[in-house]
Image: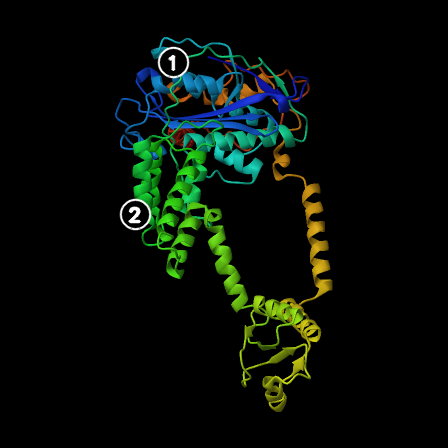
Amino acid sequence: MFVHGQLTRNQGIDPRNLTFAAIDLETTGLYPNKGSRVCEIGIVRMRGDGVVLDEYSTLVDPGIRIANDEYHGITNAVVKGAPTFQQIAGDVLAYLSNAIIVSHNLDYEDKFLTAEYGRLGINLRDIPGLCTLVMTRVQLDRYGYRLDDVANLITGEWPAASHSALGDARTLANMLARVITQAPQRLSWRGPTPVALPPYPRTGVIAPRAAGLRKGTEGWLASLTARLPLMAQPPAPQPQGVTDYQAMLGHALADGRIVGEEAQQLALLAARAGLTQLTARQVHESFLANVRTRAEADGVVTTAELKELQRAARELAATHLIGDLEQAAAADRARRNGPLKGWRLLPVGDAPGVAEVMDFASTHGATVAANVTKTVSLVVADSPAGDDPRLQKATAARITILSSGEAMQLLEKEVETTRAGLFANARGQELAEQLSAEQRQQDLRQRPEWHEAWRPRELSTAEYRALFVDRYQDWDESRRTDHTTRVTLQPQSSASARQPHRAAGKRTSGCAGALVVLASAAAVLTEAFRQLLA
């Protein structure tokens, strides 16, 4: 199906302007020729410069019993209601069309997609492909080449949802973008250019899995939403599925917080409803809007109701829907706890200046008195010589009496002093900004760590075979993939490149990864015992 190309340091097409489709499959086993099927697919369409154009992900009902869920977490209960491969075949072709297909073991995706489309009578050929397992081995000299390890080296981040199709496709896309845009030497594309794939009926039916949920700092629902595909044109979710999801959402939020088990249940219902990032946010906002309507039905939102709405809004990442309620509450709190908290002012007269002072004072936490008492801090009057008995009483009680202008100056100074705090220091603020700017400049100049693993020159075909193929010829052939069968690396001059400390086991997509790593370890141990007994 795929014709392998490569990213090379030699002349070629600038990959930053090409479209790539990073793909990952989760499968029911290793061998499609023995009946293994695809049970999840994830695709990230992107430009070589790292701009993500679209995403696609769905569980797939394989039509057979899934017995390897320990590798990817997908069970027959999880794929209940998910589309079959025949139902998604047209959508997958559309997402792969006019792009270079990328995988971290492209032969694995090749054999499964060839088998799945072969069952539909579709013969796909000559699609340009890039295997990043081969690419990283050719360009980097390091200990291991599993996707998670190489991605962590290059991006500085551990994948958020390993062994989920969309999670691994996102990891792959992020890593590829870093290699293209940040490599120590400019890389070019040598290989076939993207081609349009044949059309096939599209259904738009999806069941995206939100895998690898973490509460984190933003909550379970934020994690759930982020794990769903960000599709440019998401299909409408299933109405009954949305109803069930919102019912479960209400149950989960009834006690004011969502726990891990409830998040997993919501994720399962989100898949059955066919939610994407966009449609999930719409469902969350619709749910919160309905709850707010119920709270306002009696004409007033109580403090208890506002707290419930705030907790739900934070979980749903929809605080903007109750922003006006929060602003009103915040303004009231700010007024009561402002810098003039504890001040009690008595206005005398209705002059405009007096009214302005009182507005300013109450906004910043002061309270207004009606009569002279021991708690009055200040009397504001623009006619101190008047015959208002309160002025005489204030004078007798030795309470300060100021005009509106004097009072405003005093209060503004008090507000400024209080806000500045005890430790305010203009020089300290200046130094903090200067040091932050210096650190940003240092970060820009710092050489990325993964550049230390950059080979002095890329491997030739012969060198690649010697390092990563020939030494494993005694492996069980059913567990080995020869990545040089359709890859032609650029010829090199001079001596061979540096030997890596150890050739890594091959990372296979989806559920195959763990089995191949175990096979690699077994082979190494067998060879060690053989040497000891020799």
Residue at 62% over, 39% down: 449
Give amino acid for label 2.
Answer: His
Residue at x 53% of width, y 78% of height = 370
Task: Give the camera-side residue of 312 and 98.
Answer: 312
Instruction: Using the rendered view, name the quadrant where residue 195 is placed.
Output: top right
Of pointers 1 and 2, the one earlier in the residue sequence: 1
- Expressed as whole percent of the image width and height from the top left, the position of residue 431 reads 72, 59
Residue appearing at x 51%, y 16% in the figure: 484
Residue 474 vertical placement versus 501 (above, below): above
Q: Is residue 498 above or below residue 416?
A: above
- Point out residue 242 in the picture as x, y percentages from the top left corner: 33, 35
For the residues labelled 1 and 2, the Cα–Cα distance comes to 42 Å
- Which disc, if any, is residue 117? 1
Q: Which mark is residue 251?
A: 2
Q: Residues within 10 Å of mark 1 (few under 14, many from 20)?
A: some
Amino acid carrying label 1: it is Tyr
The correct choice, above or below, for 424 with respect to 450 in the image is: below
Task: Give the image quarter of residue 423.
Answer: bottom right
Q: In terms of depth relative to the viewer, which is nearer, 184 or 400?
A: 400
Farthest-out residue, front: 387
Q: Are the residues tagged 1 and 2 within 8 Å (C-beta)?
A: no
The mark total stands at 2
Can residue 408 be spotted in the picture? yes
Q: State the image coordinates of residue 329 (x, y, percent, origin top left).
A: 48, 60
SS of the residue under disc 1: helix
Q: Compare residues 326 and 484 and report the one nearer the observer.
A: 326
Which image quarter is the C terminus in?
top left
Q: Position of residue 28 (x, y in %)?
A: 32, 25
Residue 236 or residue 263, whichever sits in front: 236
